[in-house]
Image: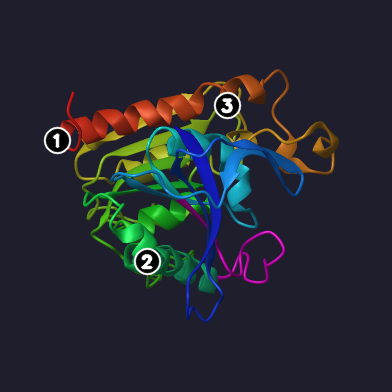
């Protein structure tokens, strides 16, 4: 199976919401340049015949869909349709709403709006499996998927943030998630989906202890699996950058001394895929 790639625009969205789609296809792929990155994909290829589970990947604050290409492409080649939204107001080149309460309200709505559009798209809806949708998020993307799945975030002044929830969202994969807004009691009491959380040992932005404290509020602890990646930093979950982007003033390319991001990304997407397979098998979505 190869990975197809195409842009998807949500028609009628006032903010201009769009997404990058990666999906299974039968057309041979080839190295294709997307800005500074080289992806082995088949651009605009037809979707392979069949029915496939859907995964959404929400990027961090000021980020972009292409930062998670090692994970999204493995999922696509393994039989997932993957949609990576570019969050309006909080993405690369469009970051005016960073650090605002508005973006905390907007992000979950954007994710659900994208889900609605995907399930209404004639070329996709019959190919998307009728099962809970996987939601994956890094940093503020982790906040986004927790909110969308039923979490109730709070401001620092202890005011509830009104966010959209969607019962169609199922398994959650959190990478260095921003969990500060979920530290208030009962913030995550409505979550029942299985959760895989990956934290970084040397993360000062979304510390491991904070993530664990927040996820302790999930009613069924057996549904939560947390792994701390030794020696990793907050940005270690981003796909490795090309050598010319490695410099001291570009924090997303930096890791703690001795951490091998290239080697890590040969392993961690497979961990996510394996976990999703176990979850889907336990729910009877696939036969073992």
SS state under label 2:
loop
Q: Residue 88's quadrant in the figure?
A: bottom right
Which residue is found at the position 28% from the left and 46% from the top? Answer: 51
SS state under label 3:
helix
Q: Which residue is mark 3?
A: 265
Viewer-nearest of discs 3 and 2: 2
Q: Which residue is mark 2?
A: 121
In which quadrant of the rendered image does the C terminus lie?
A: top left
Cα gap from disc 1 to disc 2, whole angstroms: 26 Å
In the picture as drawn, the residue positioned furthest to the left comes out as 284
Residue 81 visible in the current orientation: yes
Q: Which residue is mark 1?
A: 284
Which residue is found at the position 45% from the left and 67% from the top? Answer: 110
Magenta range: 83-100
Q: Residues within 10 Å of mark 3 (few under 14, many from 20)?
A: some
Cα gap from disc 3 to disc 2, whole angstroms: 32 Å
Up/down of 58 relative to 16, above or below: above
């Amino acid at each position: 199976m190869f990975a197809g790639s195409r842009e998807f625009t949500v028609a009628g969205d006032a903010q201009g919401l769009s997404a990058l789609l990666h999906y299974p296809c039968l057309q041979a792929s080839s190295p294709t340049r997307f800005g500074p990155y080289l992806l082995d994909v088949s651009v605009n290829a037809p979707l392979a015949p069949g029915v496939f589970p859907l995964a959404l990947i929400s990027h961090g604050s000021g980020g972009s869909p292409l930062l998670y290409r090692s994970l999204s492409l493995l999922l696509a080649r393994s039989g997932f349709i993957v949609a990576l939204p570019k969050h309006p107001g909080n993405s690369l080149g469009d970051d005016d709403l960073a650090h605002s309460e508005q973006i905390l309200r907007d992000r979950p709505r954007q994710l659900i709006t994208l889900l609605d559009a995907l399930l209404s798209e004639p070329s996709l809806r019959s190919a998307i499996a009728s099962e809970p949708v996987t939601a994956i998020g890094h940093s503020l993307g982790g906040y986004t998927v927790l909110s969308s799945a039923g979490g109730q975030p709070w401001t620092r002044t202890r005011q509830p943030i009104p966010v959209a929830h969607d019962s169609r969202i199922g398994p959650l994969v959190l990478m260095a998630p921003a969990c500060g807004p979920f530290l208030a009691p009962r913030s995550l009491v409505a979550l029942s989906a299985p959760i895989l959380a990956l934290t970084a040992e040397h993360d000062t932005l979304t510390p491991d202890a904070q993530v664990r404290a927040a996820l302790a509020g999930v009613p069924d602890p057996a549904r939560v699996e947390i792994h701390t990646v030794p020696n990793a930093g907050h940005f270690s979950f981003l796909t490795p950058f090309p050598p010319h982007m490695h410099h001291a003033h570009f924090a997303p390319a930096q890791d703690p001394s001795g951490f091998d991001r290239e080697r890590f990304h040969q392993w961690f997407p497979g961990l996510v895929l394996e976990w999703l397979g176990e979850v889907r098998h336990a729910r009877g979505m696939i036969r073992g």
